[in-house]
Image (cartoon, grey):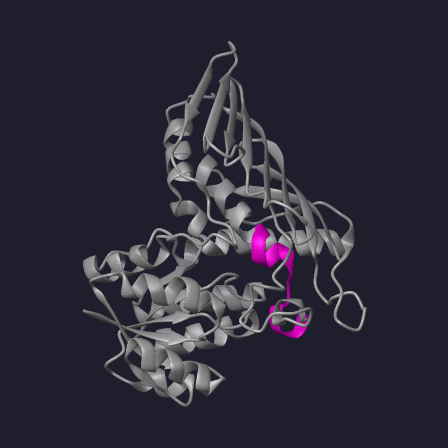
Amino acid sequence: MIKIGIIGCGKIAQVRHIPEYLDNDNAELAGYFDLNQARAAALADEFGGKVYDSYEALLADPQIDAVSVCTANHTHAEITIAALRAGKHVLCEKPMATTLKDCEAMVKAARESGKFLMLGHNQRLTKAHVKAKELLEEGLIGDIVSFRTTFGHGGPETWSIDPGRNVWFFDKNKASMGAMADLGIHKTDVIHFLTGQLIVETTARLSTLDKRYENGELIGVDDNAICIYRLEKGAVGTMTASWTYYGNEDNSTILYGTKGIMRIYDDPVYSIKVTTRTGENILFEIDQIQTNDNQTKSGVIDAFVDCLVKNQAPEISGAEALKTMRVIFASIESSQTGHMVAIDQS
């Protein structure tokens, strides 16, 4: 039985990590830490386990095998590195960290400790994305020429455990990045996953267009990010992340190939729609991607626990996530400088 510690007991822990650990026969919730001790105590009372007065105390407990890091972005690196050095496996929420140096330090700590570091890039695990990758590898739409991937919704105001216009997601000191880190990371990573190619250039614009604090001032992070990516084999496409889609969520990806077009999560019924160059329509009714209002099982926790049980390194490792974080930080640089930025993925 893998004994799990939860560090950060907010919304993502409560709607994803904790329920999915409870649903896994190989995991046991053993400990909790949160800056709000009453919140941690309430979870311990409901699900069992011990409450710690610091994350350091939790990490010092030899009974804890692994931890989920579900804290604000600016603390990910500090806690993850401490956990790995304490001999714990780590599942860290995205974004990996708020600087590239910290991301690299997390990967180094995992390598030196011999423990696993996995990131919560759940879009790699959705059934339609897994099937789409298979179809692409089979050559159904030929070589990728261009693409468009989008993740937009109305923002995190109601998502946080402390909802409202002053959520920590909007605080640059805690979040560092906005829609780019919250949503753009997912779609950047899924392009890596689907195409099997790395993004090697980005031209980006990160903007704060509409979101405001309660006092009326614009929030401190981006609420929209629009990027033009070039893949290593030459395909060019766009990635859009937005907190200002005030209607239905858009979590779609469209791939344009030499033999046809593949639309993923772009239809309310068919999760994959392929139109071939000859006009044939091929439809796949597989699943529908989760939304903020309709949370379904992510598969992330099961994948993490399975790695620990089998002692096999996770596919969504820190080293793999680092490839996506390089694109994120290069896009921020591009937006700040107004120039295309080449990405060193070596």
Q: Is residue 2 above or below residue 143?
A: below
Above or below: residue 16 compared with residue 236: below
Judging depth in this view, the residue of 333 and 164 nearest the camera is 164
> Which quadrant of the view contains residue 169?
bottom right
| Residue at the spot 49% in from the left edge and 56% down from the top edge | 322
Q: Is residue 20 above or below residue 203?
A: below
Question: Where are the magenta residues, as a range?
Answer: 172-184
Residue 182 in magenta stretch: yes
Choose between 97 and 45: the one closer to the eye: 45
Please, which residue is most extreme toward the right here?
216
Q: Is residue 104 left or right of residue 239?
A: left
Is residue 337 rendered to the left or right of residue 124?
Answer: right
Quadrant of the rendering where the N terminus is positioned: bottom left
Q: How many marks?
A: 0
Residue 84: name its quadrant.
bottom left
Image location of residue 155, percent across then percent down: 63, 57
Q: What percent of the width, then of the height, locates residue 133?
A: 40, 34
- Residue 304 relative to residue 346: left or right: left
Residue 7 in the image: state x and y as whole percent.
41, 76
Q: Is residue 315 above or below residue 148?
A: below
